[in-house]
Image (tube, rainbow, N blue to C red):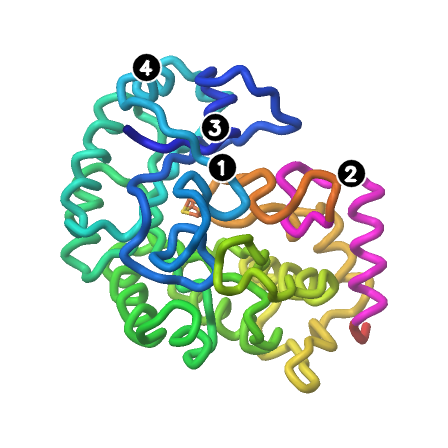
Amino acid sequence: MIRVSVGTAACLGLTTNRMDVYPTTAYLLSGNRCQMNCAFCPQGTDSNEALSRLGRVTWPEYSWAEVEKALACVEETVIRRICMQSVRHADGIVSLLGQISRIKTTTNLSLSLSAWIQDEDEATAIFAAGVDRISISLDVVKPEDFRRIKGGSLQDRLDLLLQCAHRYPGRMSTHLVCGFGETEAEMLSTIDKLLRAEITVALFAFIPLRGTKLENEQPPAVDSYRRVQAGHFLLREKVTDFSTFQFEDGRLVSFGLPGKELKLHLACGTAFQTSGCRDCNRPYYNERPGGVIYNYHHRLSTAENAAIMNEILSSVNI
Ligand code: SF4
């Protein structure tokens, strides 16, 4: 059996549920209940939440045969990538390699893997099995918060990510979550370091989820998240350099660009869309339908972008 996000299941015709919006990446979830105990995750060992939850999303189980059949038929204009998200398995990557092989014999779609791997040799085995990109999720950018929220050493995970990025340039990704008490300066300096190592960054906003240790905490302020998104975009597109950003008490107060230039670069709205591997739109991973949208899974309308631009331009020096 394999879990499939409910939006993916609808897109692949595995369920008759209708969705407001469909994913452009097929999200699969390997494993039940993680060996890790991240305080924000419903799959953590101490979480009381159902095994069918990861992030805000529900992941019903299907047989491999059903999923393979659906993936073999899906058109590339509908689904353009597969992302296998994996809990930390008791057997390391053994069962994961078998699942990757099943996917690769079924479809030629690009395959991303987001998993806990322990060393470069595991990354090598996973790439050899046919995965195009691996994400080692850091999630938390402050060492003390990393220890408290995820357990273990941020430096160790960062070192592994950087080593893999050195060995496999342009093929590594990571997930970073805003809202665990880090400042905008701390988040953006980490993003800068990762981008310089050719690591793709997927930005998330922390969402407190029922049944997790952090269920009573607050998500990040939207205006702060927007400044981080904008900063990430400007660094990623090499519009400007981290050294031009100015901060006061950790809050970004200037991108170091004149207002006119800033507007020009942010006008397309890409900065506020879901970031990460190409074609990954993660609809409603971070938001409730009708609520605040942290990551837009579609191109922004003129009105949506104008509202965000006003918010940003009024919150920084230009
Ligand atoms: S950015 Fe998207 S496709 Fe890439 S690993 Fe993360 S969730 Fe998967």
Q: CA distance from mark 4 to mark 2?
A: 36 Å
Reading the image, the residue beneath label 1 is 58
Q: CA distance from mark 3 to mark 4?
A: 14 Å
Q: Earlier in the sequence, mark 3 or mark 1?
A: 3
User: For residue 69, which numbered disc appears in the image?
Assistant: 4
Select label 3 or label 1 by which is in front.
1
The answer to whether 284 appears left or right of 128 in the picture is right
Q: Earlier in the sequence, mark 4 or mark 1?
A: 1
Mark 4 C-beta closer than 8 Å to ligand 1: no
**Which of the 4 image quadrants contains residue 113?**
top left
Reading the image, the residue beneath label 2 is 301
Q: Earlier in the sequence, mark 3 or mark 2?
A: 3
Q: Amino acid at mark 1?
A: Thr
In the rendered view, tell whether residue 140 sits above or below residue 169.
below
Q: CA distance from mark 4 to mark 1?
A: 21 Å
Q: Earlier in the sequence, mark 3 or mark 4?
A: 3
Q: Residue at x 80, y 45 (%)?
A: 304
Reading the image, the residue beneath label 3 is 8
Magenta region: 292-315
**SS at circle 4:** helix
**SS at circle 3:** helix
**SS at circle 1:** strand
In the rendered view, tell whether residue 43 sits above or below residue 317.
above
Select label 3 or label 2 by which is in front.
3
